[in-house]
Image: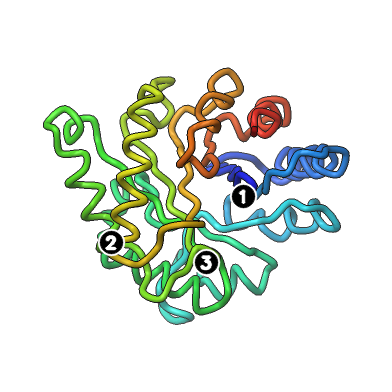
């Protein structure tokens, strides 16, 4: 199975630099024989520009979040149906920054994922533990609960992706050991199979300070199906270095 590499731009890039970044990556993809799948998740106002910049390439575009309702009085939110209408194929839901900054619950994340599936989007459901939870030995309890309560009902390996991001590693330059990443990805696969029947074929991405210098060894781990990349997705050189690291 091809590795899925997702660039989460977060609240970065203006129109000009975002368009240039997307065009540069699209051109790289056109010239490459690498079998990886690539998706860019820009800030919502940039989505039409990024869809246009990556047109006629193998680069997909996704949202960073969506609301669980199709429409209504939800100022500042974006519906899954609008993302799909703009040309998105994926959307991230339940990122730790949404869970912490906006108090999103597992039930809300599940509702968002189900809204994404209803309109044909692939839901990238994020799970992960904080440093305090890890130090207390509760990582598997926390992640197991998130998997049981955040994954959408009726999802399949074609419509659901899980992204594991240890919260303490996001943007810090720190990463778990390769053995720790392997163990937690194996645990996630087992829990997803147990709770939702998602096993073989389920892509589980690793996220958290992924960069060109560590991508190859992380992506070579058996249960790692790709990467969710933050800061290193903001330059063509760094992001392409990660893509080139795919086995």
Q: Position of residue 122 (x, y in %)?
A: 54, 64
Q: Nearer the viewer, residue 76 or 95?
A: 95
Quarter of the image where one finds residue 137: top left
Q: Position of residue 101 (x, y in %)?
A: 32, 47
From this viewpoint, is residue 74 visible?
no
Q: Secondary structure at mark 1?
A: loop
Instruction: Assess disc 1: are there few (<14), some (14-19) or many (≥20) residues with their C-alpha within 10 Å of its C-alpha.
Output: few
**Quadrant including the C terminus:** top right
Q: Which residue is mark 3?
A: 159
Q: Residue at x 31, y 52 (%)?
A: 190
From this viewpoint, is residue 126 visible?
yes
Q: Is residue 73 left or right of residue 57?
A: left
Q: Residue at x 17, y 46 (%)?
A: 141
Q: Which residue is mark 2?
A: 194
Q: Which residue is mark 1?
A: 1
Report, in whole angstroms, how far the alpha carbon at label 3 lies from the one at label 1.
15 Å
Q: Position of residue 99 (x, y in %)?
A: 31, 51
Instruction: Assess disc 3: are there few (<14), some (14-19) or many (≥20) residues with their C-alpha within 10 Å of its C-alpha.
Output: some
First reached walking from the N terminus: tag 3 or tag 2: 3
First reached walking from the N terminus: tag 1 or tag 2: 1
Looking at this rendering, what residue extends furthest in the left direction? Answer: 136
Report, in whole angstroms, how far the alpha carbon at label 3 lies from the one at label 2.
18 Å
């Amino acid at each position: 199975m091809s590795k899925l590499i997702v660039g989460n731009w977060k609240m970065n890039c203006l129109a000009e630099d975002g368009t240039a970044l997307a065009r540069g990556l699209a051109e790289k993809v056109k010239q490459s024989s690498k079998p990886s799948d690539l998706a860019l998740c820009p800030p919502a106002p940039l989505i039409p520009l990024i869809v246009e910049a990556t047109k006629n390439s193998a680069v997909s575009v996704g949202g960073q979040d969506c609301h669980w309702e199709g429409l209504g009085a939800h100022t500042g939110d974006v519906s899954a149906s609008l993302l799909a209408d703009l040309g998105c194929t994926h959307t991230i839901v339940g990122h730790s920054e949404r869970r912490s900054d906006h108090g999103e619950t597992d039930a809300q994340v599940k509702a968002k994922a189900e809204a994404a599936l209803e309109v044909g989007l692939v839901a990238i459901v994020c799970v992960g533990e904080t440093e305090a939870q890890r130090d207390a030995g509760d990582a598997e309890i926390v992640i197991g609960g998130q998997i049981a309560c955040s994954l959408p009902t009726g999802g399949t390996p074609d419509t659901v992706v899980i992204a594991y991001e240890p919260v303490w590693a996001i943007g810090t330059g720190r990463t778990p050991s390769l053995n720790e990443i392997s163990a937690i990805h194996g645990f996630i696969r087992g829990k997803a199979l147990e709770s939702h029947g998602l096993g073989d074929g389920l892509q589980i991405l690793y996220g958290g300070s992924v960069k060109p210098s560590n991508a190859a060894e992380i992506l070579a781990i058996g249960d790692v199906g790709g990467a969710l990349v933050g800061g290193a997705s903001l330059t063509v050189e760094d992001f392409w270095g990660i893509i080139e690291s795919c086995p």
